[in-house]
Amino acid sequence: MDIGTIIQTIVVLGIVAVALVYVLRRVINTTRGKGDCGCGCGKDCKHKKSAGKNF
């Protein structure tokens, strides 16, 4: 392995780690009811308060 391959591997692993942290953070916030329900209105959307839906 030359130095270019090592640098590319480190960069790719860094990007994957950042993406994984982002996804886990969104999943945790959504399951705790602090995140967006997915409608695009933000965390104060009216869908979370409607009957029969628990986000």
Image: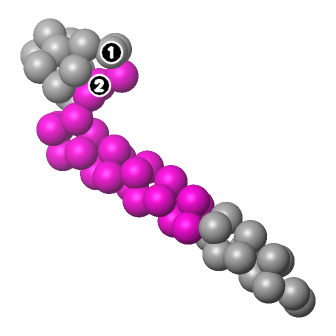
What residue do we see at 58% from left, 61% from top? 16
Give the position of the N terminus as an image quadrant: bottom right
Can residue 50 be seen here?
no
Where does label 1 land, which residue?
40
Task: Tell me: residue 54, above or below residue 49.
Answer: below
Where does label 2 land, which residue?
37
Query: Is 45 situated left or right of 22 in this image?
Result: left
Give the position of the C terminus as an image quadrant: top left
Query: Is 17 situated left or right of 53 in this image?
Result: right
The three-letter code of the residue at mark 1 reads: Gly
- Dot 1 falls on a residue whose secondary structure is loop
From which residue to which does the magenta span run? 14-38
The three-letter code of the residue at mark 2 reads: Cys
Task: Tell me: residue 55, above or below residue 19.
Answer: above
- Which sits in the foreground, 55 or 45? 45
- Which sits in the foreground, 20 or 1? 1
Q: Quadrant of residue 54?
A: top left
Query: Residue 20 location in percent, x, y?
Result: 49, 58
Can residue 24 be seen here?
yes
Which residue reaches farthest right?
1
What residue do we see at 17% from left, 15% from top? 45
Whether residue 16 appears in magenta in the rendering, the answer is: yes
- Work out how far the residue at label 2 is from the one at label 1, CA to CA, in angstroms: 8 Å
Dominant SS type (magenta): helix
Query: Residue 21 location in percent, x, y?
Result: 41, 59
